Amino acid sequence: MHIELKNKTVVAKATHQCEWCNEAIHPGVMCKYRAYVYEGQFDHGWMHMDCHDAMTSIDWEDGDCWSPGEFKRGSLEQG
Ligand SMILES: [Zn+2]
């Protein structure tokens, strides 16, 4: 069960690792910040805008999951 707490567009203030593609998000770059509870665990992270678009282009079923770095940047192609 995934409960989204926050999902906002922010400008990175430091270097973050993208949850989707595992590539760096550099300071000054617009990105998505998400805070959520997944299976009872609080987690949060940053994503490239194009990676977030790729993620939201799918209707995820409850119980579907993916691992950070599983996909290529901005794509649903597994990397
Ligand atoms: Zn990314």
Image: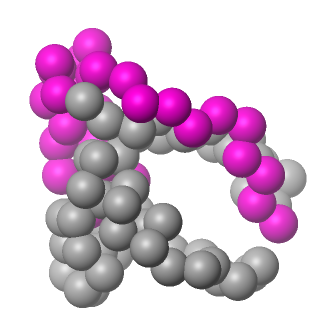
- For the rendered model, the colour scheme is one colour
Any magenta on residue 17? Answer: yes
Name the residue located 22 percent from the left edge and 65 percent from the top edge: 74
Q: Is residue 22 visible?
A: no
- The percent position of residue 31, horizontal first and vertical second, equals 31, 35
Q: Position of residue 37 (x, y in %)?
A: 76, 48
Q: Is residue 76 left or right of residue 68?
A: left
Pick the residue in front: 76 or 66: 76
> Which residue is at the front of the view, 7 or 22?
7
Quarter of the picture holding the N terminus: bottom right
* Position in image of residue 52 (x %, y %): 38, 56
Left or right: 12 with respect to 2? left
The residue closer to the viewer here, 32 or 35, is 32
Magenta span: 1-29
Above or below residue 8? Residue 41 is: below
Left or right of residue 16: residue 37: right
In this picture, is 20 found above or below 67?
A: above
Magenta-span inclusion, residue 26: yes
Outermost top residue: 13
Quarter of the image where the C terminus is located:
bottom left
Is 75 on the left or on the right of 34, as rendered?
left
Q: Residue at x 27, y 14 (%)?
A: 13
Point 60% across, 80% down: residue: 59
Where is 64 relative to 47, above or below? below
Q: Image quadrant of residue 16? A: top left
- Please tell me in which quadrant of the rendered image residue 63 appears: bottom right
